[in-house]
């Protein structure tokens, strides 16, 4: 009778490889400061849906994911990127009509221009009105 069970000695290299992989994955940049890529670039941690589910999202970017919208900050008159990481089309539409991305297909993105006046601007998804966020415009 032939056994397909690996002998303990044969498992040692596999076990060492698995432990090494876990150590490499667990090691990373412990610096909590985000890296800026431009004059205005700052990163913010924004909730993208689900309990404890957070992702790094650059300032000036709104993400649609898990049928939730993130909030963001942008300069007056600056560009705001709307990334749809969800499985359905969404919009980024200002409550007061100041901006509107139009329908953005799943996996696509669009750019809108932030209002020229500093302040907080609420926005929502026209298709899914329970999805809301806030754009904070700085002068």
Image: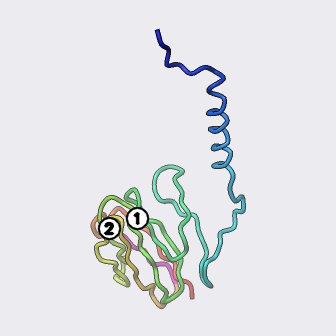
The prevailing secondary structure element of the residues shown in magenta is strand
Q: Is 83 in front, or is 68?
A: 83
Which quadrant holds residue 83? Answer: bottom left
Asked whether residue 123 is drawn in magenta, I would say: yes
Which quadrant holds residue 45? Answer: bottom right
Q: Please rate how many residues cluster around mark 2, counting C-alpha atoms within 10 Å: few if below 14, some from 14 to 19, many from 20.
A: many
Residue at (37% x, 84% y) in the render: 98
| SS category of the residue bearing label 2 | loop
Above or below: residue 5 compared with residue 76: above
Residue at (33% x, 58% y) in the render: 87
Q: Give percent across and percent down for residue 107.
A: 36, 65
Asked whether residue 89 is drawn in magenta, I would say: no
Which quadrant holds residue 112? Answer: bottom left
Q: Is 31 in front, or is 61?
A: 31
Label 1 close to label 2 by CB (< 8 Å): yes
Q: Give the labeled residue for mark 2.
A: 90
Q: Give percent across and percent down for residue 48.
A: 47, 59
Q: Which residue range is magenta in the image?
A: 119-124
Q: How many marks?
A: 2
Q: Is residue 111 left or right of residue 102?
A: right
Q: In which quadrant of the rendered image does the C terminus lie?
A: bottom right
Q: Give percent across and percent down for residue 9.
A: 66, 23
Give the label on residue 128, or none: none
| SS category of the residue bearing label 1 | strand
Q: Residue furthest front?
A: 1
- Earlier residue among tags 1 and 2: 1
Above or below: residue 103 compared with residue 68: below
Q: Please rate how many residues cluster around mark 1, counting C-alpha atoms within 10 Å: few if below 14, some from 14 to 19, many from 20.
A: many
Q: Give the labeled residue for mark 1.
A: 64
Residue at (67% x, 42% y) in the render: 20
Residue at (34% x, 82% y) in the render: 97
Q: Residue furthest right?
A: 31
């Amino acid at each position: 009778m032939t056994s397909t069970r690996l002998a303990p000695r044969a498992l040692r290299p596999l076990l060492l490889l698995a432990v090494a992989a876990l150590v490499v994955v667990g090691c990373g940049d412990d610096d909590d400061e985000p890296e800026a890529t431009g004059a205005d670039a700052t990163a913010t941690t924004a909730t993208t849906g689900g309990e404890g589910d957070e992702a790094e999202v650059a300032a000036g970017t709104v993400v649609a994911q898990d049928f939730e919208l993130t909030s963001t900050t942008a300069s007056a008159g600056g560009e705001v990127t709307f990334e749809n990481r969800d499985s359905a089309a969404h919009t980024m539409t200002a409550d007061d009509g100041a901006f509107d991305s139009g329908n953005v297909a799943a996996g696509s993105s669009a750019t809108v221009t932030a209002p020229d006046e500093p302040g907080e601007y609420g926005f929502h998804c026209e298709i899914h009105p329970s999805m809301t966020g806030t754009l904070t415009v700085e002068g």
